[in-house]
Image (spheres, rainbow, N blue to C red):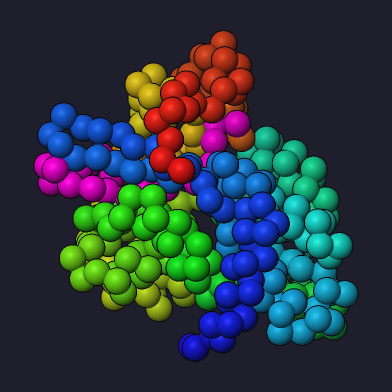
Amino acid sequence: MDYDASTLGRIRDRFYSMGFGNTPIFPISLNNGSTIFAKLEYFNKFGSVKDRAAFFMVNWELENNRGNAKKIFVEGTSGNTGIAIGNICREMGIKSRILIPPGTFPETVEKLKESGAEVEFTMEEKTSTSTEKAIQQSIALMKENPDQYIALHQHGNDMNWLAHVYTTGSEAEKQIGFPDYVCICMGTGGSIMGVGRYFKERSNRVKVVMGQADGETFIQGLRNYEKAKDREIIDRNIGIVDSIITVTQEQALESVRKLAEDHGIYVGVSSGANYHCARMLAMNYPGSKILTIFPDSGTKYKNLYASTGTFTESAIKELSGRVLTKKSSFIT
């Protein structure tokens, strides 16, 4: 589907004027000459990579119909997208309603409530972390009350991946030039497909490697390609993917711990998954430049990290007080 470039350009300009984007990159050098360039998305205005998609999804609806500002923007999610939508809508004077599974991390629930959104749990088992019912309910709300609700539906909304074409990809090119590989794990698919398409369309030598959760262990925000039920963005763009790497929760958590110990970075579990996949790639291809993203910090995962033994309580407290020890290493 074609979208008006001038409208997307206006949204991009508004995105930067409101203080989003331009996140730094942290380079991690390996002994074999490879370098992993991690874009630190927790420096976004509301703390995650999802600020980008949320801003474009909300503003696209406003650009196409100013009357939409009177409606309630609704989304089914378990994390950062809801936090971003709630905060962005609050800043723009718009109402939002976020539906979440009852197993959502307590720290995330707290952030969602602080965002200004109306937060509602889906009616299912208390331990459920699946967003399937939340997604279905948000779409049903719009169908039943089209004059009252707008379902943003991040899993099928092209503004999700286009946000990364218009912001993340272009920022990264200015910072490091063209990488040899773009390696990002799939959640909705917005980041990997948007950043991947940005570079693929500009250089046919750039390879796109999609990480995925193993499908047996739970990694917050990530999914497995074969088991994912709602993967419209991924399926529409799957032609740009050159290969797929699988990661387990244990590997993601170990990478979170290693990043903190070796580099002073305190990141979320999906960042650990991205680092694991990028490092596997870097080890297999000496001398390569690999671009990935660290979607958020570790501040929303303290219960997970404590319960899994990733960090001690005292380490979590110490890490929560800092983001990076060597700020001079940023690429801005």
Horizontal side, residue 157 vs residue 88: left or right:
left
Residue displayed at 40% across by 78% down = 236
In this view of the protein, can residue 311 be seen by the observer? yes
Q: Which of 327 and 185 is in front in this view?
A: 327
Horizontal side, residue 69 vs residue 185: left or right:
right
Q: Nearer the viewer, residue 124 or 53?
A: 53
In the rendered image, the residue lying farthest to the top is 314
Q: Percent from the top left, x then y, of residue 265? A: 45, 28
Residue displayed at 18% across by 65% down = 205
Q: Percent from the top left, x then y, of residue 56? A: 62, 68
Q: Please say whether residue 284 is one of the residues in the magenta stretch.
A: yes
Q: Please say whether residue 194 is one of the residues in the magenta stretch.
A: no
Horizontal side, residue 41 vs residue 197: left or right:
right
Q: Percent from the top left, x then y, of residue 259? A: 38, 28
The image quarter in which residue 238 lies: bottom left
The image quarter in which residue 331 lies: top left
Q: Percent from the top left, x then y, of residue 12? A: 59, 68
Residue displayed at 63% across by 74% down = 10
In this view of the protein, can residue 251 be seen by the observer? no
Q: Is 155 drawn above or below residue 87 in the view shown?
A: below
Count of marks overlaid on the render: 0
The image quarter in which residue 252 lies: top left
Q: What stretch is highlighted in magenta?
A: 278-299
Q: Which of 131 and 26 is in front in this view?
A: 26
Q: Is 323 drawn above or below residue 56 in the view shown?
A: above
Residue displayed at 36% across by 31% down = 255
